[in-house]
Image (tube, helix red, strand yellow):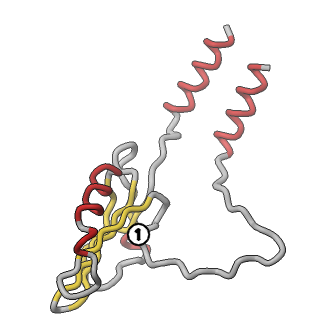
């Protein structure tokens, strides 16, 4: 009976929209397009990464940002690694898997001296479900 209850709860959680969806910047331009109008929702369970291409051409730096599947992005980034020189005709492709990570580089903050602050994403439905499951199993 417990197995049936746990299975049912897990099925409800997965089918209730808890599928993870990442947001990325999407554009193709000659300036870094990291503003709200370029934010898109990537395809759930297909595009699980953000991709950023930086091309150095004669007329300047070109940016291409998009959602990507992890397999395709990692293959592309490793294939172009030798061409990522920062010089003319350079192509750099990077992949990341946190929301809006293909935007501008974050400025490094100084490390806290006395305490370490951990920022963990809060998932109230998931936390509640885990609590509920643990109370059923005990």
Question: Dot 1 corresponds to which residue?
Answer: 102
* Residue name at image x 63 percent, y 19 percent: 6
User: Can the viewer see residue 124 in this picture?
Assistant: yes
| Relative vertical location of residue 7 with respect to residue 125 in this rendering, above or below | above
Furthest residue toward right: 114
Furthest residue toward front: 82
On the rendered image, what quadrant is the C terminus found in? Answer: top right
Which secondary structure, mark 1?
Answer: loop
| Quarter of the rendering containing residue 12 | top right
| Quarter of the rendering containing residue 35 | bottom left
* 55 horizontally vs 114: left or right: left
The residue lying toward the viewer, choosing from 93 and 16, is 93
Q: Point out residue 90 in the picture as x, y percentages from the top left corner.
A: 22, 80
Q: Point out residue 127 in the picture as x, y percentages from the top left corner.
A: 70, 40
Q: How many marks?
A: 1
Furthest residue toward bottom: 59
* 126 horizontally vs 65: left or right: right
* Residue name at image x 68 percent, y 82 percent: 110
């Amino acid at each position: 009976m417990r197995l049936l209850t746990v299975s049912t709860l897990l099925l409800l959680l997965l089918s209730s929209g808890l599928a993870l969806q990442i947001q990325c910047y999407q554009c193709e331009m000659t300036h870094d397009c990291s503003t709200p109008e370029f934010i898109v929702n990537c395809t759930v369970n297909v595009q699980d990464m953000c991709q950023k291409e930086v091309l150095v051409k004669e007329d300047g730096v070109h940016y291409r940002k998009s959602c990507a599947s992890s397999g395709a992005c990692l293959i592309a980034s490793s294939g172009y690694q030798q061409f990522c020189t920062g010089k003319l005709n350079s192509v750099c492709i990077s992949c990341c898997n946190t929301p809006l990570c293909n935007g501008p580089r974050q400025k490094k903050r100084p490390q806290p001296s006395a305490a370490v602050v951990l920022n963990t994403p809060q998932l109230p439905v998931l936390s509640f479900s885990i609590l509920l499951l643990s109370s059923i199993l005990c």
